[in-house]
Image: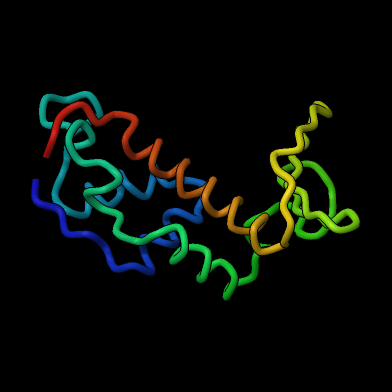
Amino acid sequence: MTLQKPNKEIQIDAILSRDVFKWYIGLLRDNGWEGELGDSDDPTRYIGFDDIISVSPEDVYNVAKRRGMENFCQHYLGRGEGTSIFENGKNTFIHSCTERGDELIQGVFDTLQAAEMSVIESRYNDARRMLNSRKTKSS
């Protein structure tokens, strides 16, 4: 299967979405794949992140900033369940809290921009792991 990389805006939308694997399967189907995951012709075994994504974390960050970082954190400049970015004195923190009350400070940053970039890099790396999770062969 030959697959052209989608335009950069579509790639960024996919990375920022919460369901990048669903987008990936849709992309494969739009390009003619009609099989099932695990079939002998399953393209997820040889088409991964680098085959369809050409944007950088900085590209994704710039779009996220333009759209509003509050759209990509459950709590932007406040604390609550989910991922939060908040300022505490001179530092900016990224904090995660689950519905069960488990809490974790994911990072402490000198600037708000560094904290925001960390959130975007996490989304980017999650997308890379997800799209490469089934890849076993070179394309």
Q: Give the percent coordinates (x, y) of residue 124.
A: 46, 49
In this rendering, position of residue 119 left or right of residue 105: left
Residue 28's place in the image compared with 77, above or below, is above
Please identify the quadrant where the C terminus is shown. Answer: top left
Q: Is residue 57 left or right of residue 54?
A: right
In depth, the one of 12 and 1 nearer the eye is 12
**Which image quadrant for residue 42?**
top left
Q: Position of residue 11 (x, y in %)?
A: 36, 60
Q: Which of 108 and 65 is in front in this view?
A: 108
Does 29 appear above or below 45? below
Q: Quadrant of the N terminus?
A: top left
Q: Which residue is drawn at 17% across and 35% down?
A: 46
Q: Which residue is drawn at 39% across and 59% down?
A: 56
Q: Which residue is drawn at 74% across and 46% down?
A: 108
Q: Give the image's coloring scheme.
A: rainbow
* Above or below: residue 10 compared with residue 104: below
Residue 65 at x, y percent in the picture: 59, 70
Label count reads 0
Q: Which of 30 and 81 is in front in this view?
A: 81
Q: Residue furthest right?
A: 89
**Which corner quadrant of the image does residue 132 belong to?**
top left
Left or right, 113 with respect to 105, comes to left
The furthest residue to the bottom: 66
